[in-house]
Image (cartoon, rainbow, N blue to C red):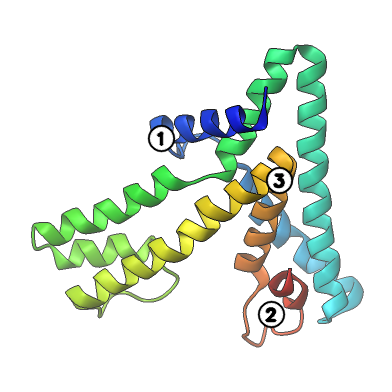
Amino acid sequence: MKRATALLAALALDALAGDPRWLPHPVRGMGRLAQALEAPARRRWGDTRGAGAHAVLGVLTATLSAVFLARVAARRLHPAAGALTEVTLLWCALAPRDLADHALRVQRALQVGDLERARERVAWMVGRDTAALDEEGVVRAAAESVAENTLDGVAAPLCYAALGGAPLAMAYKAASTLDSTFGYRDARYRTFGWAAARL
């Protein structure tokens, strides 16, 4: 299957199914693995850039290994299984439907004048306290989240997928997940999270 065809199929699948919550998602697995690697890395190398870099390397290695193994195993089984695996992995790297669904939930709550529900729904999209936001603040928070996540969840994965198929798209998702997990400037992650933030 050509890469462009696989990408179109993945986008169509996302438009139809979105991101089903019941389905195990690789990005959640990446996040859990990053958190699981943090404590051993800190025990071995302390609160250093090197410790964080080892955790980052562990997540990237595991992600790329899993993607390559899945693709090889599926292709050996049958060419159609290989194509389906590629499309499924690309689908997991893209999130336009999920992003639109979250934004529309906020919009619907505001349209019926339910500011409290709109605050709750925009809290699913942003990483800050939304309890005191007025209507304008809710709209601004939702718009900023849509703008940022359109890059992280749609445009960038599409570009990486166009360049290198599922492996590069999933490597990008791993890097993005690592930044979301470790890339903070607080006391806990200022040093440890350096590699994740730079990546």
Q: CA distance from mark 2 to mark 1?
A: 36 Å
Q: Marks 3 and 1: which is nearer the front? A: 3
Q: Which residue is depicted at the point 73% across and 47% down? A: 168
In this picture, residue 76 sits left or right of residue 33? right
Q: Nearer the viewer, residue 111 or 157?
A: 157
The residue at which mark 2 appears reads as 189
- Disc marking residue 163: 3
Q: CA distance from mark 3 to mark 1?
A: 22 Å
Q: Which residue is mark 1?
A: 15
Describe the element under mark 2 as helix, strand or loop: loop
Image coords of residue 173 (percent x, y): 64, 53
Under mark 2, the amino acid is: Tyr
Looking at marks 3 and 1 on the same chain, the residue that comes earlier in the sequence is marked by: 1
- Under mark 3, the amino acid is Leu
Give the quarter of the figure containing the N terminus. top right
Q: Nearer the viewer, mark 2 or mark 1?
A: 1
Residue 116, x across and y down, in percent: 18, 67
Q: Quadrant of residue 164?
A: top right
- Measured as percent of width and height from the top left, residue 51 is found at 85, 73
> Looking at the image, is mark 2 or mark 1 earlier in the sequence?
1
